[in-house]
Amino acid sequence: MKKRMSWYWAVPGATGLALIMAAVMLLVSTAGHTPTASAQAGCTLTLTKTVAPTAPADGVPVGAEVTYTIVVTADAASTAACEDVVVTDAIPADMNCLDATESGSGSFTDAGCAADGTVTWTAGADLAIGQTATLTMVAEVEANIADDASITNTAAVDALQGATLPEDASATFRVNGCELTIAKDADDNEVGEGGEITYTITVENEGDVDCLDVVITENIPDDTDCVDTGVTADSDLDEGDFDVAGCDGSGDVVWDGFDLNNGDVVEVTMTVDLTSGAEDGDEIANIACVTTEAWDDVNGDEIDCDEMTVDVEGVAATATPTVGPTATRGPTAQPLPTIQAPPPVPTARPIAPPITGTGPDGGSGPLALGLGLIGACLLLVSGAAMVKRTR
């Protein structure tokens, strides 16, 4: 017996209708719609890196400092600013990071030298179209690096997802393993009046390679005159192997124009006389330094220096004559005025004729004159008495 099959439409419940309506609305809302592009889609970054100074022909000396310069730019062809820009630089294993800074945009934080061996500069603001940031890192070549080694340093840049990023940027230089040390000594720690001091300067190449164009400099101490230079018997070089100048008083004494092979030692001497300007108790101090032309080109200073002093003893002090106080001169005496002699007194004329008479001795003279005067006085007294009586 044949069974008849029948088809029935099931009417969805309320839940089913809700799901169907949601699906329809989603299709309608997305029809003909293009997704919004990321803000970083228009950002293009460029990155360059250099190292300075340019390595000399014989390589950068051990212990020298080099400066890496990293330049990151939001390319002018960008159509949007670059967001969340981060630059990283891994410090090479054979170098010590000394400093890391930023200049230019002013938006990057100064990273400093991180303990984990990676320097990171993080932008605190967007890098505008065409804007450039310059990042620098100063590092030192370690002393234990192998000679002729090449050191490569690489920097990378990152930004918000969607930005067009450049390839990593690298810079490489070659190392010169020349390592020079210097030490100096004097034949005595004390020097007396009219005495001499002989300094011995010892320079050794402790590196793995020859040191080229070595320069030794010794300053002539104050209160001394250079009288001689020489080479000791222990030196691996002779006087004819280098040039010497300056002992004539024209400046520092300089030995140059020579190379020092790895492991070799050069010992040079300088003798000076004590001059009259030195005094008892003074210290005669001087310093000797060594460098190479390559090092000086890179660092502008010496590789190594050594300093020492010699005491001045037994120099008689120069007696200085003592000058007493200067006498103070009083006021200059003025000449007395000239006293004119008075005019001569005229001779007095006699009022009465002289009294003459003869004394008892029959002569004239003072006795007669005196008697005459007495007589005259008696006459006057007697005459006055008579007048009084008549009245």
Image (cartoon, grey):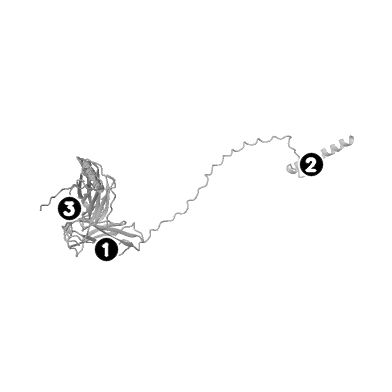
The reply to whether the C-beta atoms of the residues labelled 3 and 2 are less than 8 Å apart is no
- Mark in the foreground, 2 or 1: 1
Q: Which residue is mark 2?
A: 374
In primary-sequence order, the first of circles 2 and 1 is 1
Q: Secondary structure at mark 3?
A: strand
The reply to whether the C-beta atoms of the residues labelled 3 and 1 are less than 8 Å apart is no
Q: Nearer the viewer, residue 191 or 219?
A: 219
In primary-sequence order, the first of circles 3 and 1 is 3
- Mark in the foreground, 3 or 1: 3
Q: Quadrant of residue 60?
A: bottom left
Q: Residue at left 82%, top 40%?
A: 378
What amino acid is labelled 2 in the image?
Answer: Ile
Q: Which mark is residue 185?
A: 1
Image quadrant for the C terminus?
Answer: top right
- Mark in the foreground, 3 or 2: 3
What amino acid is labelled 3 in the image?
Answer: Thr
